[in-house]
Image (cartoon, rainbow, N blue to C red):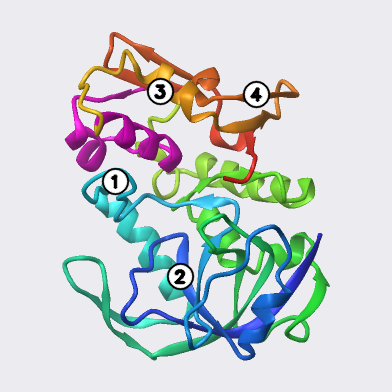
Amino acid sequence: MPMLLIKGSYRVKGSQPDGDSIHFTPDDPAQWDLVGGAHPVKRNAAGTAQLRLDAIDALETHYARTGPRQHQPLPFAHAAAEELLHWLGFSGVQRSSNETVATSIPDAVPGFVLTRGADLHGRCVALAGRGSPPGAGGTGIHVDVPLLETTANHHLLAAGLAYPTYYRNLFADLRTALTAAVHEAQAAEPARGLWPSDVTTTGAKIFGLSSLTDDVVILPKLFRRLVDYLHLGDPSLSGFPAFLAQAQDRFFILSTGHSTTGLDAVVEVTNGQTVRMTHPAEDLVFDEE
């Protein structure tokens, strides 16, 4: 899969990195202008931009799109964030109560990103690498499975600390390799990371926001939709399928070969309080948001 390689460094002080998002500063900030796609990468005066790690979704530490900040069960959310920073080379990370990093050792670590575009929020959608890059910054490079396996994206899935969440821009061979890492984490004895606690497809009983923030471990995309729905003020989930239909998420179901619109096609609600997805996350490929 052809991708743009950008060499630079990761910095976390003063930011709120989680398990699938971190700031990156290129050695040459002008290289952000080489990133393809419909949306430009948003960066500050120093050239620092926020990355969204491609193909993975870690539990939320501070989601606040439609109301007050909410989080998913913090042991797994923090474990993913800590593992990402440790894998990249940070230690001694101290955070304030609002998840902002106050100190880290060192201040920055070298690395590289591999990207094909940015999302509509201006975050660079990327594979995150550490250390010396496999080519020159600002050039195109072929990303194969062995290179993918050296990235944080693959590492977090293999560790069972993130869910797979695929978008159409990712080539099938890389998606297949990531799914294999997920299945290996699930099949391990014991299953790794969050998988022993996951109830995305078996059913999560929701009795309000506290169920989502403190109890149930589910796909973050489903969590975000549930939070947005509950912020409307209805504690019953009976209206949740209709809410999902209105959101009009567009995706392809790999196992059936069908494209569809609306997560209501793959979400069931029973007894007004239990929600589950009828397909695992790795069976869905979303259009970019």
Task: Looking at the image, tell me whether mark 4 or mark 2 is earlier in sequence order.
Answer: 2
Q: Position of residue 151 (x, y in %)?
A: 62, 67
Kindly check if marks 3 and 2 are in contact, taking CB atoms under 8 A apart as contact: no
Quarter holding the N terminus is bottom right
Q: Position of residue 286 (x, y in %)?
A: 62, 38
Query: Residue under circle 2?
Result: 22
Mark nearer the viewer, 4 or 1:
4
Magenta stretch? Answer: 202-230
Q: Which mark is residue 72?
A: 1
Provide the secondary structure element on which disc 1 rests.
loop
Q: Visible in this render: residue 118?
A: yes
Provide the secondary structure element on which disc 3 rests.
helix
Kindly check if marks 4 and 1 are in contact, taking CB atoms under 8 A apart as contact: no
Task: Looking at the image, tell me whether mark 4 or mark 1 is earlier in sequence order.
Answer: 1
Kindly check if marks 1 and 2 are in contact, taking CB atoms under 8 A apart as contact: no
Q: Amino acid at mark 1?
A: Gln
Mark 2: give few (<14), some (14-19) or many (20+) Cα within 10 Å.
Answer: many
Determine the image quadrant of residue 2: bottom right
Residue at image x 49%, y 21%?
A: 245
Q: Which mark is residue 243?
A: 3
Residue at image x 72%, y 51%?
A: 170
Task: Looking at the image, tell me whether mark 3 or mark 2 is earlier in sequence order.
Answer: 2
Q: Nearer the viewer, residue 186 or 198?
A: 198
Provide the secondary structure element on which disc 2 rests.
strand
Provide the secondary structure element on which disc 4 rests.
strand
Per the model, the C-alpha gap separating discs 3 and 2 is: 31 Å
Query: Residue under circle 4?
Result: 260
Question: Is-magenta flag for residue 215?
Answer: yes
In the image, 135: left or right of 269?
right
